[in-house]
């Protein structure tokens, strides 16, 4: 299935200097490079940047424009850990590799801030993130989680908040407690992704927009085909995620494009904005179908939630998202919603990232499962290390086992929709 959500009227597109349209020419004719990269999201731009820094000649192909996909439409929250729990990771790869994966996720937070500073990326980064509990059962989960973070992983940055302490970060009676992490944070995802694209170009990367990869022929020299040209290269990095489709069918079977949605309100008076989120932290609850929200640089409330496994955007999106927002903040009932948008992110069956090789010289990065805002940049660094011959850190991720979604092309979405009904009921109960 070809996934094709329009990018407008995203608040991010409206507030990004580069907007939501191509800035670069498309590929025409044949181009020779050391490395080809497919996909102009954070993973693709980071891969290209890190490879160019190592002296490789890199060509990046993007079907629309840099930041078109999940990277440029997301909630913009940079968070430690992976979408899969540490317990699940221990079961899959053992305690030692699970610890390495956690430490790499923390390194991803530091790398994100380092890239912003090094390349002067104006993306409205702000520190502080809080995971919040909506029911008593969640409080027990948060207590277990904080003990795991402190005692098993030595992550002392995060701390537990009771209900009264939580009011210093989110003024909502819906939440019972939370975990605050000052090392995590939030940013403008489209500005950040496009900033990485500019940094890659400054390092020598050739970026072609409006250039969809149609397929490739592997071998000692790889040929990537497009509608009006081709790229010949020695290595290829696939970063198309949910939009990669028929370019690599074996990968498409292992991920699913899931629709996620956001709204942006009218700008608030700064004092009113701080009445909602006093510390300007990003917030996410720990339901399976979660709500997440934060303030923009111009004091809009950006509110995300809902998911769609049907590949269809829900009707009356702005209205349904507004209801979710008012359930959290009844005091926002008078606010107008000025932007609403949706897009696909890629999930793996285990919710763990799926990195690996399709051939010795063909690498792929996918399956970030909603936890990719920071991890995607690190993924680009790891694949650059692997191309250069040091694959130890890349292979920690490559050892994670992954299976196809059940049901085949026709039935995997219906079967997943049925499975998700259980989790929706679990959240409600």
Image (cartoon, rainbow, N blue to C red):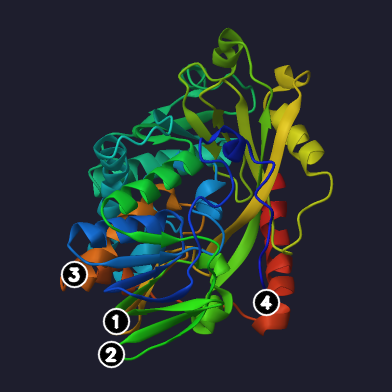
Q: Residue 119: x and y, percent?
A: 28, 40
Q: Are marks 1 and 2 in contact (CB under 8 Å)?
A: yes
* Camera-nearest label, 4 or 1: 1
Q: Earlier in the sequence, mark 4 or mark 1?
A: 1
The secondary element bearing badge 1 is classed as: loop
Q: Is residue 164 left or right of residue 360?
A: right
Q: Residue 333: x and y, percent?
A: 77, 21
Q: Earlier in the sequence, mark 1 or mark 3?
A: 1
Q: CA distance from mark 1 to mark 2?
A: 8 Å
Q: Earlier in the sequence, mark 3 or mark 2?
A: 2
Residue under label 1, please give it.
Answer: 361
The secondary element bearing badge 4 is classed as: helix
Q: CA distance from mark 4 to mark 2?
A: 35 Å
Q: Is residue 135 visible?
A: no
Q: CA distance from mark 4 to mark 1?
A: 30 Å
Residue placed at 32% from the left, 59% from the top?
Answer: 205
* Camera-nearest label, 1 or 2: 2
Residue under label 3, please give it.
Answer: 392
Q: Earlier in the sequence, mark 4 or mark 3?
A: 3
Q: Residue 163: x and y, percent?
A: 52, 22
Q: Is residue 316 visible?
A: yes
Residue placed at 73% from the left, 30% from the top?
Answer: 338
Residue placed at 29% from the left, 82% from the top?
Answer: 361
Q: Residue furthest top?
A: 271
* Camera-nearest label, 4 or 2: 2
Q: Are marks 4 and 1 in contact (CB under 8 Å)?
A: no
Residue under label 4, please give it.
Answer: 412
Residue under label 2, please give it.
Answer: 220
């Amino acid at each position: 299935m070809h996934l094709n959500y329009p990018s407008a009227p995203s608040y991010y597109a409206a507030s990004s200097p580069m907007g939501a349209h191509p800035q670069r020419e498309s590929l025409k004719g044949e181009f020779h490079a050391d490395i080809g990269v497919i996909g102009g999201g954070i993973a693709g731009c980071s891969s290209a940047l890190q490879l160019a820094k190592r002296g490789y000649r890199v060509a990046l192909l993007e079907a629309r424009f840099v930041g078109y996909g999940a990277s440029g439409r997301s909630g913009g929250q940079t968070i430690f850990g992976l979408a899969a729990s540490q317990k699940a990771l221990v079961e899959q790869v053992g305690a030692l590799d699970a610890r390495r994966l956690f430490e790499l996720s923390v390194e991803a937070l530091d790398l994100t801030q380092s890239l912003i500073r090094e390349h002067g990326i104006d993306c409205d980064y702000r520190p502080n993130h809080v995971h919040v509990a909506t029911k008593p059962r969640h409080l027990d989960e948060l207590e277990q989680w904080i003990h795991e973070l402190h005692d098993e992983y030595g992550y002392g940055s995060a701390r537990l908040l009771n209900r009264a302490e939580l009011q210093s970060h989110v003024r909502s009676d819906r939440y019972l407690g939370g975990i605050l992490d000052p090392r995590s944070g939030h940013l403008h995802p489209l500005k950040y992704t496009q900033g990485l694209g500019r940094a890659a170009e400054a390092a020598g990367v050739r970026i072609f927009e409006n250039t969809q990869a149609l397929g490739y022929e592997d071998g000692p020299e790889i040929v990537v085909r497009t509608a009006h040209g081709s790229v010949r290269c020695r290595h290829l990095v696939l970063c198309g995620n949910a939009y990669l489709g028929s370019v690599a069918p074996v990968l498409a079977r292992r991920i699913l494009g899931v629709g996620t949605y956001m709204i942006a309100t009218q700008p608030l008076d700064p004092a009113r904005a701080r009445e909602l989120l006093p510390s300007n932290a990003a917030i996410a609850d720990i339901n399976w179908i979660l709500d997440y929200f934060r303030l923009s640089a111009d004091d809009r409330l950006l509110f995300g939630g809902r998911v769609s496994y049907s590949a269809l955007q829900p009707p009356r999106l702005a209205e349904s998202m507004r209801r979710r927002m008012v359930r959290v903040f009844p005091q926002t009932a008078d606010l107008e919603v000025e932007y609403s948008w949706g897009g696909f992110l890629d999930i793996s069956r285990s919710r763990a990232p799926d990195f690996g090789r399709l051939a010795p010289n063909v690498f792929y990065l996918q399956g970030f499962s909603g936890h990719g805002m920071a991890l995607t940049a690190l993924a680009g660094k790891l694949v650059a290390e692997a191309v250069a011959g040091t694959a130890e850190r890349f292979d920690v991720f490559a050892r994670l086992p992954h299976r196809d979604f059940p049901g085949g092309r026709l039935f995997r979405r219906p079967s997943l929709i049925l499975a998700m009904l259980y989790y929706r009921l679990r959240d409600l109960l």
